Amino acid sequence: MTKRRSLPCLAGRYACVSLLAAASCSAWAQSAAHVAAQPAHIIKISTEQARQTGISLQRIGSGAAPAQGSFRLQGTAVLPNQAIEVVSAPLAGTVQALLVNPMQAVRAGQPIARIHSPQLLEWQRDYVQAQAQAELAASKLRRDELLYKDGLVSESRLQDTRNASVMAGVAARERRQAMRLAGVGDPALRQLVTSGQLSPELAIVARRAGTVTEQMTAPGQRVEMGSALLKLADTRVIWIDLQATRAQSEVIRVGDKVTVAGCERPGRVSEKGAMVSPSAQTVGVRATLPDAAACLKPNQYIEATIGTAAAPGDALTVPARALARSGGHDYVFKQVAGGFQPVAVTVLSRDSAFVSIRAALPAGTEIAVEGVATLKGAWLGIGAADAEPATKAQAK
């Protein structure tokens, strides 16, 4: 008669097996983490094993560039602040017409808007009055000067007349300057004084050449003094703002050569940021290119290559396939006696084929550029790189 095993006994055995498996996995994970945390660990592998597993080497100095490096950075073509001008309403009023359109090029002195402003009537009246009072005060001063020479008026009266003439002239110049700031030129001011005809219409002209990049109002809209109407930009001057990592920024120097695909003439690094961006953790690098407007447009996303002639002695360029990543760090495997040793590196820049790194690798050191995955597996305890090759095992 077959004895039935009790369920508690079976459950206990399964629990024991599960605990043993969990303990084994935990021990393996701790072992792998311990190996990854020790970059001085040597992966034992013979030359024959390396050949059969497809591991190939490259000597530092052939294909590497310890004296000069290059970085491929992402960035944007931007307009400097000096190239942007906001055209604002000099007086409160109603926009009668916008005489230009977005994306249109304008020349200096070209009328770009027209405003109907009752406030302009008040300013014109005040200017005409101030100008008339200044002329009257000047006439009185000339008369009193003649009377003083003939001894008909006292010196104190002449001094009062002179002070009144000065104050009237200051008031007239103040009103003239206000009219000029409103966009009224000297010919129009002279005609205003001569004819005395007041007009509420004010033509706004462009003070310099540029392109209309933004329309900030519409015909018929009521605007206050200082309200923005249009935005003009001189697109002939374009800068390049690039984003570099902190390690890259330490290598890049002002004056380094900058090339952009599609632009014939290279530029130079003109400025480098002193702060790290809190959101992207990058450092800004600014470059200027001659004739950049011929190949770039403002707000265009670009990729630029910076050649650093002042790179430190440990800046190297190696194939991208030579890198292995573990525990949030990058490593290369250098050949040592009896195998390979992982060496931590700092990545400065990378592209699809090559990586610029900083590492303590003297000239002549050989690193693995093929079979890196095999070495990484053996390093973490996943593979069996230190086992005998299959052919030799069968022969034994």
Image (spheres, rainbow, N blue to C red):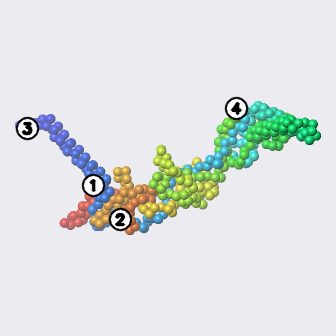
Residue 187 at x, y = what percent?
82, 43
Q: Do the residues bearing badges 1 and 3 touch, measured as CB atoms within 8 Å?
A: no
Q: Nearer the viewer, residue 327 or 373?
A: 327
Q: SS at mark 4?
A: strand
Marks 1 and 4, Cα distance to the nearest angstrom? Answer: 76 Å
Q: Nearer the viewer, mark 2 or mark 1?
A: 1
Name the residue rendered at 48%, 58% in the picture.
251
| Outermost residue toward the left in this view | 1
Alpha-carbon neighbours of circle 4 within 10 Å: few (<14), some, or many (≥20)?
some
Q: Nearer the viewer, mark 1 or mark 3?
A: 1
| Mark number displayed over residue 2 | 3
Quarter residue 271 falls in: bottom right
Q: Earlier in the sequence, mark 2 or mark 4?
A: 2
Q: Earlier in the sequence, mark 2 or mark 3?
A: 3
| Mark number displayed over residue 381 | 1
Inspect the image, locate mark 3, and give the three-letter code of the amino acid beneath it.
Thr
Q: Earlier in the sequence, mark 1 or mark 4?
A: 4
Marks 3 and 4, Cα distance to the nearest angstrom? Answer: 101 Å
Q: Do the residues bearing badges 1 and 4 touch, measured as CB atoms within 8 Å?
A: no
Q: SS at mark 3?
A: loop
Residue 260 appears anywhere in the view: no
